């Protein structure tokens, strides 16, 4: 994959697919996590991925730590990749007993979380920093001040959001002096709401990059799901799988590459985030960048994923 895909309106350019580091540190021991992280990151680098997606809560910070250790073992890699991470979700019991699971976009939390992520990843600057979920108590002026502080300190290059509705993006962008260059949303053949709720329209109109999390619907559109999120348990993949397999058979590629190519064709410039830790799957997913679906193929997949004909 070439790294010439623009990331929003920023000077950053990335590969057409991103590598998601959520599950690189799920084991209980550091040695296993480091070995998993090494294998996955090495495969991603060799396959041409240059955007690496993380978050402070992934494996409760262990994913950033494992990523940082692998990065320190590979001299020169930092200058060749774009690192994205997120903040804003707080677990129950933090910082004290009785605190609920919640979202936190306070300036204090944003700045402190950024500094903690930098320390865990052993880097000086985060390329793309995103709010993970929209805090219902978010004040756009407070977030704007935190973003400005982090940029002026050289700790963050660019900013974005994740799971924000178009109205929330518009509100925050109106008050921020820095552009929001990305919105990370769930989008796949089995989760098409962003095609109709204005999220992808907003990205296209405002030159924001949509980053697609769970682009294979938790693995349902690949070789099966090992772990689904609660909102994904009702997905019905049978019709989509049949159409994917038909096109994959005609094209001579893996099913998952076709599912990802469906996202790549959208004019908003969707960047799917591939989250498998298996090197073979990381390589197979990268083949999507070489596959151009026809409009007819794209719409057949759309209908199969919807489970209903177009009006």
Image (cartoon, grey):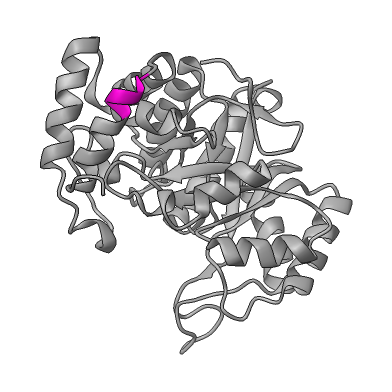
- The front one of 310 and 105 is 310
Q: Residue 143, position in %: x, y?
A: 74, 68
Q: Residue furthest bottom?
A: 98
Can the viewer see residue 220 in this picture? no
- In the rendered structure, the answer to whether residue 191 lies left or right of residue 144 reads left
Asked if residue 230 is positioned above or below residue 105 in the image, the reply reads above
Asked where in the image residue 257 lies, by quadrant, the reply is: top left
Instruction: Write the residue at 76% across / 42% down.
Output: 124
Asked if residue 239 is positioned above or below residue 27 in the image, the reply reads above
Q: Residue 287, position in %: x, y?
A: 37, 17
Asked where in the image residue 288 lies, by quadrant, the reply is: top left
Q: What residue range appears in magenta?
A: 293-298
Whether 31 is among the magenta residues is no
- The front one of 239 and 63 is 239
- In the rendered structure, the answer to whether residue 281 lies left or right of residue 244 reads right
Q: Does the magenta stretch mainly form a helix, a strand or a loop?
A: helix
């Amino acid at each position: 994959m070439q790294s010439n895909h623009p990331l929003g309106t920023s000077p950053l350019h990335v590969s057409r697919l991103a590598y998601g580091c959520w599950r690189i540190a799920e084991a209980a021991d550091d040695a296993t996590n480091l070995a998993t992280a090494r294998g996955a990151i090495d495969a991603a680098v060799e396959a041409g991925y240059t955007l690496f997606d993380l978050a402070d809560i992934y494996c409760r910070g262990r994913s950033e730590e494992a990523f940082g250790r692998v990065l320190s073992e590979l001299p020169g890699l930092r200058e060749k990749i774009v690192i994205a991470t997120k903040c804003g979700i707080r677990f129950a019991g933090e910082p004290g007993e009785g605190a609920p699971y919640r979202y936190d976009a306070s300036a204090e939390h944003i700045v402190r979380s950024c500094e903690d992520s930098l320390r865990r990843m052993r880097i000086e600057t985060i390329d793309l920093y995103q709010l993970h979920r929209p805090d219902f108590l978010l004040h756009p002026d407070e977030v704007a001040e935190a973003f400005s502080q982090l940029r002026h300190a050289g700790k963050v290059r660019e900013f974005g959001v994740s799971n924000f509705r178009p109205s929330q993006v518009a509100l925050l962008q109106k008050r921020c002096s820095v552009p929001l260059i990305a919105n990370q949303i769930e989008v796949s053949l089995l989760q098409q709401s962003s095609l109709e709720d204005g999220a992808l329209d907003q990205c296209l109109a405002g030159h924001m990059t949509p980053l697609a999390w769970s682009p294979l619907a938790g693995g349902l559109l690949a070789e099966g799901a090992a772990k689904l999120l609660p909102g994904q348990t009702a997905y019905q993949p049978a019709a989509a799988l049949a159409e994917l397999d038909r096109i994959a058979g005609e094209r001579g590629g893996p099913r998952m590459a076709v599912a990802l190519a469906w996202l790549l064709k959208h004019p908003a410039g969707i960047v799917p985030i591939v989250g498998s830790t298996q090197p073979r799957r990381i390589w197979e997913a990268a083949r999507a960048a070489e596959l151009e679906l026809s409009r007819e193929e794209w719409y057949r997949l759309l209908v199969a994923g919807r489970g209903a004909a177009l009006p």
